[in-house]
Image: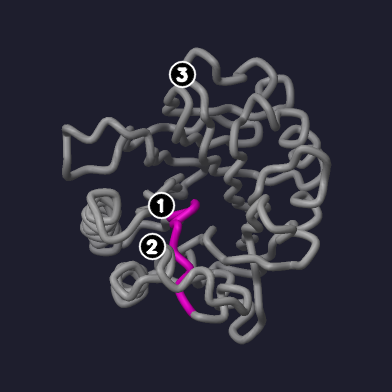
């Protein structure tokens, strides 16, 4: 099974790019983030024609998450991250696909920090960690895939001091990510590339893509049962270089 995560940064604007990548990469499951579309604006017909069933939770202008499955229909198990019924931001959806529990998540950015947006980021990650622990305890084959808006380690950020005050790299943010690893989740890219520099996001500003001034923000975390099945992982970097591309590239794993 090939499972991917892709922050598309506006699914309707990038639809042709997304469809081209689906044809080329042929992932079995895709977790999408930053749909920037309401539920009614989601391009279901185009994805169905491409051979993908879909579940989604949209939101106008911002946020939005979806799960696609090739020649299958995902079965939703969670429409939102548990723990705060008053949270109206569309940042989490979870579904069963071919015997695997897959979550697509778009974690809060948290900037500027300190401040209420950073407080929300940390509170959201507390909820994620609590739910993730319940999945570990249930011993299910699971993948938590998405844009975590955390660069876990210093070498997940290009050589610069411009991010020193950014919420993506603060000790509290990195500690939240580390707590997931401590629960037993495996960072798939780091398992396959333990020492290499790997980026998944390149900001549109300041010529960062041509300079390869990137960050690693998009992660696939695997439960113990899924980690045992991991056979490969990678980043489809070339997608970031195409015309009118998202500022993220797809990240994927393959499993036996």
**Is any atom of residue 37 visible in this view?**
yes
In the picture, measured across the screen, residue 172 lies left or right of residue 57, that is: left
Whole-Å distance between the Cαs marked 2 and 3? 29 Å
Q: Label 2 belongs to which residue?
A: 167
What colouring style does the render use? one colour
Whole-Å distance between the Cαs marked 1 and 3? 22 Å
Q: Could you tell me which secondary element the residue under label 2 belongs to?
A: helix
Q: Could you tell me which secondary element the residue under label 1 belongs to?
A: loop
Q: Position of residue 162 (x, y in %)?
A: 53, 70
The reply to whether the magenta stretch includes residue 38 is no
Q: Mark 1 packing: few (<14 Cα in 10 Å), some, or many (20+)?
A: some
Residue at the spot 77% in from the left edge and 29% down from the top edge: 16
Of the two numbered discs 1 and 2 on the same chain, state the one appearing first in sequence: 1
Q: Could you tell me which secondary element the residue under label 3 belongs to?
A: helix
Q: Nearer the viewer, mark 2 or mark 3?
A: 2
Of the two numbered discs 2 and 3 on the same chain, state the one appearing first in sequence: 3
Q: Which mark is residue 72?
A: none
Q: Which residues are magenta?
A: 144-153
Q: Label 1 belongs to which residue?
A: 109
Q: Quadrant of residue 213?
A: bottom right
Whole-Å distance between the Cαs marked 1 and 2? 7 Å
Q: Quadrant of residue 78?
A: top left
Q: Which mark is residue 39?
A: 3
Q: Position of residue 112 (x, y in %)?
A: 36, 54
Of the two numbered discs 1 and 3 on the same chain, state the one appearing first in sequence: 3
């Amino acid at each position: 099974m090939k499972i991917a995560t892709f922050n598309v940064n506006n699914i309707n604007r990038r639809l042709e790019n997304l469809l081209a990548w689906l044809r080329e990469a042929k992932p079995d499951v895709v977790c999408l983030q930053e749909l920037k579309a309401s539920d009614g604006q989601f391009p279901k017909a185009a994805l169905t024609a491409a051979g993908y069933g879909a579940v989604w939770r949209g939101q106008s202008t911002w946020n939005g998450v979806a799960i696609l499955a090739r020649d299958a229909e995902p079965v939703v198990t969670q429409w939102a991250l548990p723990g705060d019924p008053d949270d109206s931001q569309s940042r989490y959806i979870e579904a069963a696909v071919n015997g695997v529990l897959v979550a697509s998540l778009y974690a809060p950015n948290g900037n500027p920090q300190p401040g209420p947006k950073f407080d929300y980021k940390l509170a959201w990650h507390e909820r994620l960690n609590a739910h993730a622990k319940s999945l570990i305890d249930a011993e299910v084959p699971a993948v938590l895939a998405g844009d975590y808006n955390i660069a876990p380690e210093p070498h997940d950020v290009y050589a610069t001091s411009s991010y020193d005050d950014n919420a993506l790299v603060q000790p509290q943010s990195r500690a939240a990510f580390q707590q997931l690893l401590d629960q037993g989740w495996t960072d798939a890219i780091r398992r396959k590339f333990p020492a290499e520099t790997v980026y998944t996001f390149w900001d549109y500003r300041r010529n960062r893509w041509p300079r390869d001034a990137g960050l690693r923000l998009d992660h696939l975390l695997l439960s113990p049962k899924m980690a045992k099945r991991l056979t490969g992982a990678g980043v489809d970097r070339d997608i970031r270089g195409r015309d009118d591309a998202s500022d993220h590239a797809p990240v994927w794993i393959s499993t036996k």
